[in-house]
Image (cartoon, rainbow, N blue to C red):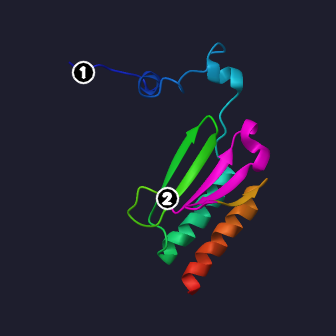
Amino acid sequence: MTEVVTFEQARRRRHPKTGGTHPSHPRHAKGKADFFNRRELGEILQSYSQGVIAGDWLDYALDWNETGVTFAIYGQVSAVPMYSVVKRGKASRRQGAYQLLGRGGVLKSDGSLGPVLRFLDSRRTALVKS
């Protein structure tokens, strides 16, 4: 028999640690998780689309947890992203709110998104020129 489930109930079943906003909930006590706002996501997607047009990048993924949110960029069929744009949570911002991660580690870290995306664009342009 089919059971009707609301989105909130389904979310709690799949991700019990993230569901709910009740004041007694542990995540509520620590504060809201950080996400990309509309402007930030628009800037990231603009940069990403240029890489897709150039043929460098094929896919992307979004992920978030207690430490922040990640926009991962994939260039080939691979389980490991080529680059990841990360926005750290308030508790983890000692090194900068935004980071660009490559396969070798942190490539750029800054307090604003613009310099991180410019560095990402310069890496993409260097690949296209060679």
Q: Is residue 11 visible?
A: yes
| Residue receiving disc 2 | 81
Of marks 1 and 2, the one in the foreground? 2
Residue sitting at x 47%, y 28%: 15
| Residue receiving disc 1 | 2
Residue sitting at x 65%, y 34%: 33
Q: Amino acid at mark 2?
A: Pro
Residue 99 lies in what quarter of the image?
A: bottom right
- Mark 1 and mark 2 lie on one chain; the one further toward the N terminus is 1
Residue sitting at x 64%, y 38%: 67
Q: Amino acid at mark 1?
A: Thr
Foreground pick, 129 / 107: 107
User: Which segment is the magenta one?
Assistant: 82-105
Single out the residue that lies furthest toward the left: 1
Single out the residue that lies furthest toward the bottom: 130
Dot 2: element = loop
